[in-house]
Amino acid sequence: MMLVDAAFMSIGLNYFTAVVPAVDVYERAMERGKVPSSLDQMADLSLGDVTHLWKNRRSWEMARGVAQALTSTRALSSTDDRQVLRDWAASTPLADWRSTPVGAVNGVGINTYQYLRMMGGVDTSMPDKIVRRVVIQILNEAGVDMPTTGDLELIETIDRIGHICGQRPIELTWMTWMVQSEGKTMRMDKYRELLKRI
């Protein structure tokens, strides 16, 4: 489910109004045995079996490619997919992320790579446009000059901000998403029930 979530999120649609409902439909189909429910099954994915749930072929190809990359690094003793994701997230480098097996998958950008690491338990951040905009605004209002131009610079800056204010980078990332408004309502309020599930 985490991989499907990341694959759907990777094309830049609204997470709450497009991605989460689609992942929910996938989860229900998975519970009925209609779609892959493991990394091994996702690695052997037949696109024709799933495009009726989510039309974007690139998302499915990315999910299949990441599943193949993760299963190729699976320790012989580990059959638990969550542990495979955790082991990968804990050991994969950030500095040269693009040259890693997951980073080399077509459709995996720095945001998807970081999102997968976050879901694998790494306390890090995503340098997406919302996070960047909020962090730059906070730094400007505070009169602080920290690097935010490059993706890796922004991730490092968020780490430094977290250290200074006593917050985890993953919390700061979620905070930037939640304080955004949709219409007159803050996302945190609008999606309160959904957040309990996420």
Image (tube, rainbow, N blue to C red):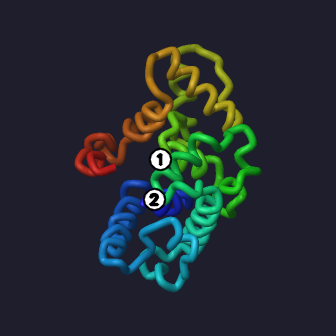
List x then y, in percent, for residue 85: 52, 51
Q: Nearer the viewer, residue 35 or 183?
A: 35
Residue where numbered disc 2 is placed: 5
Quarter of the image where one finds residue 181: top left
**Is disc 1 in contact with disc 2, using a CB cutoff of under 8 Å?**
yes
The kind of residue tagged 1 is Met
Q: Residue at x 57, y 14 (%)?
A: 143
Mark 1 and mark 2 lie on one chain; the one further toward the N terminus is: 2
Q: Nearer the viewer, residue 88 or 126?
A: 88
Residue where numbered disc 1 is placed: 119
Most extreme residue toward the bottom, as rendered?
A: 48
Secondary structure, mark 2, is: helix
Q: Nearer the viewer, residue 181 or 15?
A: 15
Pointer 2 local density, CA inside 10 Å: few below 14, some 14–19, many at least 20: many
The kind of residue tagged 2 is Asp
Residue 168 is left or right of residue 31, and the answer is right
